[in-house]
Amino acid sequence: MSKVSTQASASADRYVRAAIVVALFVAWEIASRTGLVDARLLPPASTVLATAGELVATPAFRNHLWTTLAQTLAAFVIAVPLGAILGLLIAENRYASEVLKPLVFFVFSIPKSIFLPMFILAFGIGFGQKVAFGVFSAIFIMMMTAFAAVESVKREHLMVARVMGARFSQTVRNVYAPSMAPVLLEAVRLAMIFNFTGILLAEMYASRTGIGNQIGLWGQSFMLDRLLAGILIVSVLAILFNEGIRVIETRIGHWRT
Amino acid sequence: MRAPTSRETRWLIVAALVVLWEFLPRLGLIPTLFLPPLSMTAVALWTAGPEYLSHLGVTLREVGVALVFACGGGIACGIALGSSARFRKLLLPVVSSAYAIPLVVLYPLFTAWFGIGEPSKVVFAAVYGFLPTLLGAAAGVQTIDRGLIVTARSMGATRVQQIVHVLLPATMPTVLSSLRIGGALVIVGVVVAEMLMSTAGIGFLISRYRTMLDSPKVFAAILLVLALAVVFDLLVQTAERRFLKKGRGDAAAQPQG
Amino acid sequence: MDTLHRGEVEVRNLTRTFGSGGQEIRALDDVSFTIPAGKFVSVVGPSGCGKSSLLMMLVGLSEATSGTLEVAGAPVTGPDPDRIGVVFQEANLFPWLTAGKNVEFPLMLKGVGKAERADKANAALDLVGLQGFAARYPHELSGGMKQRVSIARGIVQDPDVLMMDEPFAALDEQTRMVMGDELLNIWERTKKTVMFVTHSLTEAIYLSDHVIVMSARPGRIVDRIDVDLPRPRTFEMTSTPEFTRLRNRIWEQIRVA
Amino acid sequence: MDTLHRGEVEVRNLTRTFGSGGQEIRALDDVSFTIPAGKFVSVVGPSGCGKSSLLMMLVGLSEATSGTLEVAGAPVTGPDPDRIGVVFQEANLFPWLTAGKNVEFPLMLKGVGKAERADKANAALDLVGLQGFAARYPHELSGGMKQRVSIARGIVQDPDVLMMDEPFAALDEQTRMVMGDELLNIWERTKKTVMFVTHSLTEAIYLSDHVIVMSARPGRIVDRIDVDLPRPRTFEMTSTPEFTRLRNRIWEQIRVA
Amino acid sequence: QETVRIGLATQAWWPTVVAEAAVRQGLFEKEGLTAELTVYQSGGETFTALAAGAADVISIQPSIVATGRTKGVEAKMVALGANANYGWNLIVPADSEVQEVSQLEGKNVGITASGSLSDFLALWTIKEEGVTFNSVPLGGAGLVPNLISGNVDAAVVFAPLSFQVIQSGDGRSILDYGAAIPEHLNSGWAASDAFIESDGPVLQKTLNALYGGVAWIQANEEEAIDLLVELNQVDRTVAEQDYREQFAKLSADGILDVAGAQAAVDLAVIGGMTDLAPGADIVEDRFRPVPTQP
Ligand SMILES: Nc1ncnc2c1ncn2[C@@H]1O[C@H](COP(=O)(O)OP(=O)(O)OP(=O)(O)O)[C@@H](O)[C@H]1O
Ligand SMILES: Nc1ncnc2c1ncn2[C@@H]1O[C@H](COP(=O)(O)OP(=O)(O)OP(=O)(O)O)[C@@H](O)[C@H]1O
Ligand SMILES: [Mg+2]
Ligand SMILES: [Mg+2]
């Protein structure tokens, strides 16, 4: 495919995607307005959007949002590189991977919220505890995916780097990282989502501020318009982040035909 | 003295964890409310054995059904999407964005729509496990050698044949890792859904006994979740032995590695 | 289908450019030629002159920028393994399949029965001097052995037209000669049309009815030489004056090109 | 380091088997030879006789089953890019790097500055006839071009000993000759030791001081021929009786082997 | 200035409003304290935080404290908040055919979680009203949606959600637990034995401020309702009802006794709970709150 048509189709894709999203909202609106679904259980999209607008305009809500975002960001910055590097180190060492891979998997398959009390025990309640729990929620998916990503590194490329005297750190940066990029970027995406959800859960469980606290209240008070608006805002933020990753992805993935 | 084999080391670690689990609470370093000694947990599990077994049956059934959708469907869709540049660029952003919606928070609504019985748990867990599996498989497809697909095409392989005979085996390592991730998430999804609202299942026991501050019974249930993960891991390992060991020349590339 | 045309290859005013805008590369420029059915034609030309690009278009794996390509009287629209088989410049073996299964692959796609497949694959492996290697995986084979498996895979398809892209590049002179004779045997027995890309002028003359000589980028046809040596060809012919004359003529063309 | 030994290669009673148990393959059997420092030695032998295996051991990427390997008076224990550089049989370029960056790669590992790196890489690319291709990605290059980038990457490392595994296999005769002369130029200028695997007997004689002839599996050394032709070598020499005599002698050995 | 960490079981429950009112009126400051308010998902989480040392004083129902004591968490109720389940209602959809509790025979009734206060109320209903129905845990956020969608036939709903559902016409109360269940130590404030011993003065000051909050709420109806509207994000009419039926009835002096505690424990036993500490072990009546004046 020539470059012109790729660019053209890329922007066409954007329209198609936008159309899909708009169609979903329209379907939602219609379903709710016509009574196809109970409007009490799914308020119309327009109501939710309006509520979201009001929320964003509320300073108190914005404060909650910032708290959550700051925690999410901090956890992200810790969990992603740490998880990727640990995952790589474990997967690349046969001994370590035989010993640790199953253990990582077992921890990964237990619902993380069970551990929330322990985090309160260890960190109290606050920024640090939320960040720690965010890291805990995200790091395992990062490691698991790094295990998978290592499989996609071609042995020949490692061999070339080795014979040229690459140190381990150099090999990581120059061979592992670019080879693993597509899988790892998916992992980053998932890690962000897990991290975000983890922090929301931790905030719903116990918190002073943060949007999870608000979402908890709205849920328990049956305020669906606000609950859905809050979730919408959270989702939009996550999607923006996702798109950011996509930019990186296309920037570094252009060599893939 | 010879170095312990990986299996031995793994058991050593497990043994150490067991000892810690028993003695940290016994020595009063962790309140038993947060972590009851292993022996207490085991006794709780033993005395309530029949109750646990019947609930385990429910969870197993839910996990089983959700696995089919999440892993089977996730891998199939992931490979189909990943193998077409067009669909990948068009749909993956929508798909991964959809995952950014914190489903756990929406679960109460989810049940209002889908009912509160097993189907809603299965749907929730399937959705929870489906996307990471799909994304992982789709990313895995991108890392394979395009030459192999070109070769198969030149031999007249149909789209289905390309997927079955080239994409699937070529991405087998990533596919199996995705399977692991998807499986773990399905387990987590079912248990979390049961914890949130249900009348049966391991998750139900966890949240019930957690509310009643009966930690030994909570951890007994967690032990069962772990057991589920172990069994699932064994299944994946069997698949790995069957599909992976062949045809990979690690030995030649990294003899000392 | 007109049996007279069976195997005829006709290329008219073929141009192929890569990239777009200022970055455009013209790989092939106004290339026209015909290969009559049942003839053995070699293509020679400097590295990067567009031989592989031409082949990829002829087998329907990439599209012409302008011009037409016809095989057996019908335009090429996509891969058609019954009409055209191809041996790529790179071996492109499936690493998860044994040498035998790699050779069986195209037959499996066509639904040929197990026993017949194995027989044919073994016969083809014998032909390329790899008896006893059917159970080996590609990573256990040397460079030349891999290429020979790839040749066997091309032969086993038994198409009307066989396109081969430098199939003997990784072979030693002795093996190369043996394989050339084998190829001629097959060709004479089955009356296929063969298009053979090579860098060895001796080989081109020794094997072919006609030799197409291409110039450096952008690839153009600079000469088309009829080899009037009698068949069967013998090793001794390579030192006849006629052979030397042909060789020198091509050599001059390539040097200038 | 003893400058007299700098670049000397010594192999004694080398045996290499692959696999184990009943499936054992003996690739090399009791191979001994010496390459005096600063000499140009070619290795020829039938496909699958163990040439690449030998090379992999000499550059420290795989271990001998028995016997010793010494380079510059010290046993080979692992890759040592300052002493030994290697050009593999397959190009093994990093697909995410441009041709230029691929060539710069070994320099980058050594920490050479950006400008110097680019200069050296460009010079090396010029040498292999790829001026102006520095910005291209591997998938945009033809087979022969990829191999030339790989050669440039080997040359730019400037080690004491250069090992090359059929570096010119994918090149047309004209380019091959030009590159051979360039290689001789470099060799004469830098007084490197070169070990050169090739399938072209003419090339082996034309380039070398000595030619090592190997037999088919298990690989043994069947002859070691001194080429007493004066230097610099010229194209005309290839038709001298002496040249023909050497060529025939090797040819006979290989045929028998 | 000393910091006291106050754990609040859910945002919408009355203690959260009381504590927030005390903070806004500057009552903690007057006592020389800084109050750090943390909202938890439910009583269990709050109590766990107390056990973890992440909270000093918490709002809680005594049954949890009684259970906790037998699980090694040594804490006691230190002040009475309410002596009935104000605002708790058994609600059916407005268009339901169910008119009285007995008609729920064999049906599904939504509760928040197994073992929670709502579970206990459902069990109490079964016992006292002689019906048998299935309790279905739905989580706090799942009660009303599943009631509306018909997944359950009735639900045990807490205030102010109960008022909201009734006012909006989505539901109808068939049992008011606040009136139906005899008076007992229903809920209040608790602290760990260790905190009671080592930080008695701080605890006293904290209770002073909290009951200052109660006093302010009960004395300033309009402003209190404004605060309810703001904090719980509910309609004013809901807040008004909430005020009338809950906040106006809160204990103003916080004085508790063993009898009330024992009544609570006995009720919990009716609700099917076992392994409870006796009422005498879970109250500490040393602290008589002296409401701080704004
Ligand atoms: N996908 C591509 N994108 C851009 N340029 C390409 C692409 N494929 C090939 N080219 C360019 O087209 C030209 C012809 O390439 P091709 O592979 O056909 O050469 P070739 O004759 O087969 O050479 P060789 O003998 O070295 O294999 C080269 O200059 C190459 O750089
Ligand atoms: N990893 C391996 N496992 C098993 N057998 C191997 C392995 N690598 C090489 N061999 C075998 O060793 C023998 C020598 O292989 P090698 O690659 O050294 O041959 P070569 O002389 O380089 O051949 P060519 O000229 O075809 O490249 C072959 O028979 C091959 O099948
Ligand atoms: Mg080519
Ligand atoms: Mg080789």
Image (cartoon, coloured by chain):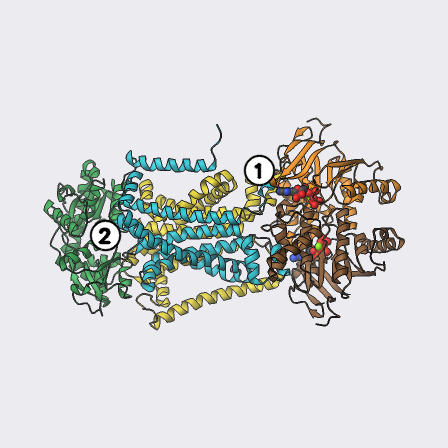
Chain colours: A yellow, B cyan, C brown, D orange, E green
The answer to whether residue D155 of the structure is visible from this angle is no
Mark 1 or 2: the one toward you: 2
Q: To which quarter of the image does residue B168 belong?
A: bottom right
- The mark found on residue C140 in the picture is none
Inspect the image, locate mark 2, and give the three-letter code of the amino acid beneath it.
Ser
Q: What subunit carries mark 1?
A: A
Q: Would you name the residue on which mark 1 appears?
A: A167
Horizontal arrangement in the rendering, residue C217 relative to residue B179 (left or right): right
* Quadrant for the C terminus of chain B in the image: top right
Residue that carries the numbered disc 2 in the rendered image: E116
Element at label 1: loop
Left or right: where B237 falls relative to B254: left
Seen at 16% across and 60% down, the residue is E244
Label 2 Cα crowd, 10 Å radius (few <14 / some 14-19 / many 20+): many
Can see residue B188? yes
Q: Position of residue C247 (x, y in %)?
A: 84, 54
| Ligand 2 within 8 angstroms of badge 2 C-beta | no
Q: Quadrant of ligand 4?
A: top right
Label 1 and label 2 in one chain: no
Q: Return the x and y of residue A16 as percentages of the image width and height.
A: 50, 66
Front-lying residue, C133 or A175? C133
Horizontal side, residue E196 vs residue D43: left or right? left
Q: CA distance from mark 1 to mark 2?
A: 58 Å
- Please give the name of the residue rendered at 43% of the width and 57% of the height, measured from the top-left corner: B68
Neighbourhood count class around disc 1 (C-alpha, 10 Å): few under 14, some 14–19, many 20 upward: few
The x and y percentages for residue D214 are 74, 39
Quick one: which residue is furthest to the left in this view?
Answer: E259
Badge 1 residue CB within 8 Å of ligand 2: no
Mark 2 element type: loop
The location of residue B132, given as percent across then percent down, is: 45, 54
> For the residue marked with disc 1, what is the amino acid?
Arg
Q: The numbered mark 2 sits on a residue in which chain? A: E
